[in-house]
Image (cartoon, helix red, strand yellow):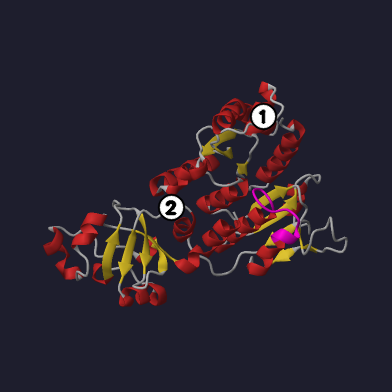
């Protein structure tokens, strides 16, 4: 069941941070375990309906626990339940951001959890590490703190190697750092590998991450006061914007555009928009605003972007010069098939590829 004392301890620290003028959002799991406790289940459910039913029973208990704990410090909890599908659609993504922003303006503490009552494997975040990373980018967080059962990232498994050294500062989550997930002795869902990939995602968007020992007394207060505990993952000076980060991690491409060599080079090297003159083939059926892959003439992926025309319209304007758009379609509502602000290169999708490779 829920550790009520632990929630109260965290709520007390959140109260301290709010008193300092900091805005706080919480990503919290626990609905399924709370439901198991209420129903007297001795083992974790294995079927999707049983998991969803346990989550439905437990979610109200989880929120009541958070709200009661935060009320002791004059704060109000606000329940926010999300699925990955909610953030994969641009308008719903923006609606979620506006809602969270309003809750913060009201002085509430959003308590965010994956909506286990309706999620299926095809539309889940993976774990709360990944959910927290996406929420951090969604709201433009200044810092994300993971309160974990591990106290830091080590250069080896501290259980097997007494001389393993805690890394206090990681300037970049590169391939060498990702390999430490296995060395840490715990990988997979919720493990060190997941935390490192979440750090990589957030760092790509310019958000630092602090991995802190969650069960140490006042760990959150101490970390935010600057004590050298846990591991700090710095954010690089140069990073992609929120739109490109969303393109890299959330939408599932609904089709492909095959480009000529000139358009492929312009996207890769000059960061230009995609014009109809550079499109040679349309694959799939999709509507306006859909996410599609752009492929070079050799079939290699260049990136993902949001289209300004649907598949049937693009088929009519293949190779068309901008000046001839209206004569081909009878109208013209955009010069570009994909605007450069709505396009992410494959290099910017690297973290997504890494996530899928380790999952």
Q: Residue at x 32, y 67 (%)?
A: 258
| Residue 185 lies in the magenta-colored region | yes
Up-down: is 157 above or below 99?
Answer: below
Badge 2 element:
loop
Mark sitting earlier along the chain (2/1): 1
* Residue 116 placement: quadrant: top right
Q: Quadrant of the C terminus?
A: bottom right
Q: Secondary structure at mark 1?
A: helix
Q: Which residue is mark 2?
A: 251
Residue 34, numbered label: 1
User: Residue at the top extreme?
Assistant: 39
Q: Is residue 23 visible?
A: no
Q: Which percent across, then down, holds residue 149?
A: 75, 47
Quadrant hosting residue 181: bottom right
Q: Residues within 10 Å of mark 2 (few under 14, many from 20)?
A: many
Quadrant of res 311: bottom left
Report the front residue among 289 and 295.
295
Q: Main secondary structure of the magenta part?
A: loop
**Residue 82 picture location, percent across and down:** 51, 40
Give the camera-side residue of 352 and 43.
43
**Quadrant where the image shows the N terminus:** top right
Name the residue nearer the viewer: 250 or 80: 250
Q: CA distance from mark 2 to mark 1?
A: 32 Å
22 over 174 or under it: above or below: above
Residue 278 image position (x, y, % from top left): 27, 71
x, y (%) of residue 275?
Answer: 27, 68
Magenta segment: 181-191
């Amino acid at each position: 069941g829920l550790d009520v004392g632990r929630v109260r301890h965290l709520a007390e620290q959140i109260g301290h941070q709010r008193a300092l003028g900091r805005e706080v959002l919480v990503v919290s799991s626990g609905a399924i375990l709370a439901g198991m406790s209420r129903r007297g289940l001795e083992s974790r459910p294995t079927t999707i309906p049983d998991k969803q039913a346990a989550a439905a029973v437990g979610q109200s208990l989880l929120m009541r626990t958070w709200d009661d704990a935060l009320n002791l410090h004059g704060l109000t909890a606000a329940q926010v339940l999300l699925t990955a599908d909610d953030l994969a659609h641009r308008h719903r993504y923006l609606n979620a951001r506006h809602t969270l922003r309003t809750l913060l303006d009201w002085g509430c503490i959003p308590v965010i959890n994956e909506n286990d009552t309706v999620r299926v494997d095809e539309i889940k975040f993976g774990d709360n590490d990944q959910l927290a990373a996406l929420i951090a980018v969604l709201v433009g967080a200044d810092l994300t703190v993971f309160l974990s059962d591990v106290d830091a990232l080590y250069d080896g498994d501290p259980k097997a190697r007494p001389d393993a050294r805690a890394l206090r500062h990681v300037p970049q989550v590169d391939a060498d750092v990702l390999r430490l997930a296995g060395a840490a002795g715990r990988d997979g869902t919720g493990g060190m590998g997941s935390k490192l990939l979440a750090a990589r995602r957030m760092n790509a968007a310019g958000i630092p991450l602090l991995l802190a020992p969650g069960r140490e007394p006042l760990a959150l207060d101490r970390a935010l006061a600057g004590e050298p505990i846990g591991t700090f993952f710095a954010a690089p000076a140069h990073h992609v914007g929120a739109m490109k980060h969303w393109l890299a991690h959330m939408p599932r491409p609904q089709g492909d555009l095959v480009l000529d060599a000139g358009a492929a080079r312009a996207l890769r090297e000059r960061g230009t928009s995609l014009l109809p003159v550079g499109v040679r083939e349309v694959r799939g059926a999709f509507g306006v605003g859909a996410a599609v892959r752009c492929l070079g003439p050799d079939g290699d992926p260049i990136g993902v972007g949001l289209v300004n025309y649907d598949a049937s319209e693009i088929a009519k304007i293949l190779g068309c010069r901008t000046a001839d758009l209206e004569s081909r379609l009878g109208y013209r509502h955009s010069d570009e098939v994909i605007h450069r602000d709505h396009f992410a290169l494959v290099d910017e999708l690297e973290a997504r590829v890494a996530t899928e490779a380790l999952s």
